[in-house]
Amino acid sequence: MAEIETKFSQNQPLKTQKIFIGAQIFLRIVVIAASFASTWLMLTNKQTIDIGGFVLDAKYSYSPEFKFLSYANIVVGAFSFLSLLFLVLVGRRSSNPNYYFILFLHDLALMSLVLGGCAAATVIGSLGKNGNSHTGWMQICDHFGKFCKRATTSVTFSYFSLVCLLILTITSASKSRQIQV
């Protein structure tokens, strides 16, 4: 009976380590997919309308906030892929808390970058949807509906990526608490 209890208690940390690594891998894959989906949606987002003989364009490149979101998502997707490789090649073999501290800092930086991009794109998207009567800015989403829907979907994917990065940051921070100074 004592052997079974000893064996069970030894396998428990190994099982939790495997679940942790599996969750990290899954969340990083989701971040990569969401970041690149958001980037693709934004980079291909454009709409042309004709109003009384005037041709008007709406493109993501006309807004520095949308460009920032796109470039931030490219960086986040690429660096998440690198962290996935790091996790698969190094992290699976070792449970060294120093590795998790590196991942914590990495995830925190990526989360901050995506948060900035999401905030900027949300503000300009709200301005495009609602306008601002105090400054005289008119809403454009009633004319450029397709453009606004794609931009909204892109920002939604970015927020989904942000939530996954938040979870990764919290779990990496909790794993790195075991560092011996």
Image (cartoon, rainbow, N blue to C red):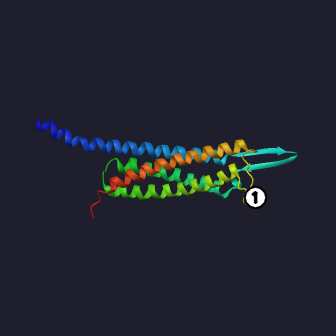
Q: Which of 74 and 57 is in front in this view?
A: 57
| Residue 81 seen in this snapshot | no
| Outermost front residue | 134
Give percent across and percent down for residue 177. Answer: 31, 57
Give percent across and percent down for residue 146. Answer: 70, 41
- Residue appearing at x 72%, y 50% in the figure: 59
Give the amino acid type for the residue marked by disc 1 in the picture.
Gly
Give percent across and percent down for residue 51. Answer: 84, 45
Q: Quadrant of residue 120?
A: bottom right
The residue identified by callout 1 is 136
| Residue 148 seen in this snapshot | yes
Rendered-image quadrant of the N terminus: top left
Instruction: Locate residue 36 relative to residue 6 in the image: left or right.
Output: right
Rendered-image quadrant of the C terminus: bottom left
- Residue appearing at x 33%, y 58% in the figure: 98
- Residue appearing at x 72%, y 59% in the figure: 134
Q: Residues within 10 Å of mark 1 (few under 14, many from 20)?
A: few
Instruction: Locate residue 85 relative to residue 56 in the image: left or right.
Output: left
Secondary structure category for the residue under label 1: loop
